[in-house]
Image: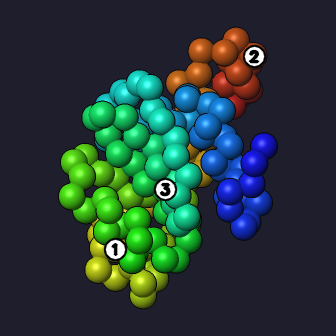
Amino acid sequence: MEFYYQRFENNELLWAFERNQLICKTLAYMVTFKQYENLKVTPKPHSIEIQNDDVFISVYIYVGYESNEYLEYINKKNVHIISFNRMTSSMHENKKFKNEIKFIDPKALFFTALSFSKNESLDDLKTILEI
């Protein structure tokens, strides 16, 4: 696995998206309430892009996003900027577009992906959660 980002956890996030379409589809569903297929994952210096012809999701990772990637995205259609950090929208750097940033709780992504999974082994985990 190639390291793209300085922080290991951001590389892990990138790899999870690259390896697992279910996670990408779940994230897309969580921000649009629609199902999408064939989502492509692309690392960028300050974010991770998840997209196809119908939806564009930008996962905010680093400061610098506001003066780089954000400027590329403002003219695209069906753009969703998300962050897994609750503080991102309150950062001074993001004040111009703070209302566009959607916070997604990582645990909510996990449990939603778990509920969408068709894996029989995971069905057992779903059963345990319901006890």
Q: Is residue 66 visible?
A: yes
Q: Secondary structure at mark 2?
A: helix
Disc 2 from disc 3: Cα separation: 29 Å
Front one among 122 and 83: 83
Q: Position of residue 96 (x, y in %)?
A: 29, 80
How far apart in space, not on screen, are marks 2 and 1 (Cα)? 40 Å
Callouts 2 and 1 close, C-beta under 8 Å: no
Instruction: Report which quarter residue 74 is drawn in.
Output: bottom left
In this rendering, is residue 95 above or below 32? below
* Residue 85: x %, y % from top left: 55, 66
Which comes sooner in the sequence, label 1 or label 3? 3
Which dot marks residue 98? 1
Q: CA distance from mark 1 to mark 3?
A: 14 Å
Question: Which residue does the image show at 45% across and 71% down from the upper left?
Answer: 65
Residue at (32% x, 40% y) in the render:
55
Q: Is residue 19 left or right of residue 113?
A: right
Q: Amino acid at mark 3?
A: Val
Give me the disc on residue 121.
2
Say whether marks 2 and 3 touch (CB < 8 Å).
no
* Callout 1 amino acid: Lys
Residue holding disc 3? 59
Contact between labelled residues 3 and 1, with CB atoms less than 8 Å apart: no
- Tell me, for residue 57, which label it has, or none: none
Q: Quadrant of the N terminus?
A: top right
Left of 87 or right of it: where is 15? right
Left of 40 or right of it: where is 11? Answer: right
Where residue 24 appears, as percent x and y from the top left, is: 51, 36
Q: Would residue 33 be visible to someone looking at this image? A: no
